[in-house]
Image (cartoon, rainbow, N blue to C red):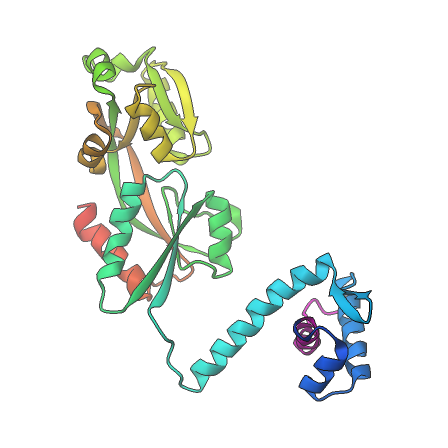
Amino acid sequence: MSDLINYKHLNYFWTVAHEGSIAKASGKLNVTPQTISGQLSLLETRMGNSLFEREGRGLRLTDTGRLVLRYADDIFELGRELNDVLRGVPALGPSEFIVSSASALPKTIVHKIIDPALHIDQDISLTSLEGPIEAILAELAIHKVDLVLSDKPVTGALSIKAYNHKLGESGLTFFAAPKLAKSYRRDFPQSLNGAPLLMPTKQNEIRQLVDYWLNEQNIYPIIRGQFDDSALMKAFGQAGMGIFFMPTIIADEVCNAFKVEVIGQTEEVTQKFYAISAERKVKHPAVVAICDAAKHHLFH
């Protein structure tokens, strides 16, 4: 049996679900009720589950039916849009540009990277998402997002067809609330030995690099907190819970926004930034603007 769904059967199901009965769907589709019933039976066999159950004289969607309907709504909405485009009907309103960034990326960096896309000639409506890198790359693979921002490149291990566009890299700056900074500023980075440190969680690329750097220098801080969200880590750092680091490229913004002070900086560890797209050669005008601005202005 073919793995492909028969979209004619799906259209019959979709119409019945929205009309509420086979009889009403029959009138709308101009086919006999028996034909629709037969096609629904074939679709249910293909799905391996019932899509409707009887409720009085009408039909009610099963749990599987509700799931299938959500997908069918999207499928036929896209079909209508495609039909309009092919008829030469222009899309109304700004063009949607969906960017998904890895949770651990500092929001200030994400803003700096994305901002050039909002200043191109084309009218852009931005949707900015975030999540675990594996999840957002999966969404890129099925074209639910236009671009993924990450601090590590996609590799063949994920079996996802995607392409890395390196934007640049930055060394790290360590920060703390003023009182804490005063105690640990002298003799950096050795001053971090035994110091209270706030870190990204271990699945983040930069955490692994910093751990290695500290171990190489026999520096063993006390990990007071681990965070997926960089904004939350900065908030706890501002409250004096511990020392934290951010890319040096946003050091001034971090100091101003969180009222913290610099303890020290290093170029021995750098955080790299990548735009990951589904296309080898970038063509989307917003993505082109992001890559060009990052390489020539942001990470110069």
Locate residue 119, reporting x and y percent. 22, 61
Residue 121: image location, x then y, percent: 22, 69
Identify the residue at horizontal 22%, vertical 11% (top origin). 183
Q: Report the residue at 36% width, 29% height from top.
A: 233
Quarter-of-image position of residue 267: top left
Residue 193 quadrant: top left
Q: Is residue 13 magenta?
A: yes
Verify whether residue 286 appears in magenta: no
Q: Position of residue 211 (x, y in %)?
A: 38, 24
Residue 31 x, y percent position in the rendering: 74, 87
Q: 276 or 23, which is in the foreground?
A: 23
Near-viewer residue (16 or 44): 16
Visible in this render: residue 108? yes
Instruction: Work out which residue is located at the far bottom of the displayed protein and give it.
Output: 30
Bounds of the magenta span? 1-17
Question: Quick check: 103 left or right of 195?
Answer: right
Quarter of the rendering containing residue 72: bottom right
In this rendered view, identify the residue nearer to me: 239 or 217: 239
Q: How many marks?
A: 0
- Judged by its main secondary structure, the magenta piece is helix
The reply to whether residue 156 is visible in this rendering is no
In the image: residue 271, left or right of residue 76: left
Residue 265 drawn above or below residue 104: above
Q: Quadrant of the N terminus?
A: bottom right
Q: Residue at x 42, y 26 (%)?
A: 226
Farthest residue in the front direction? 56
Q: Residue at x 82, y 67 (%)?
A: 56
Q: Is residue 149 left or right of residue 86?
A: left
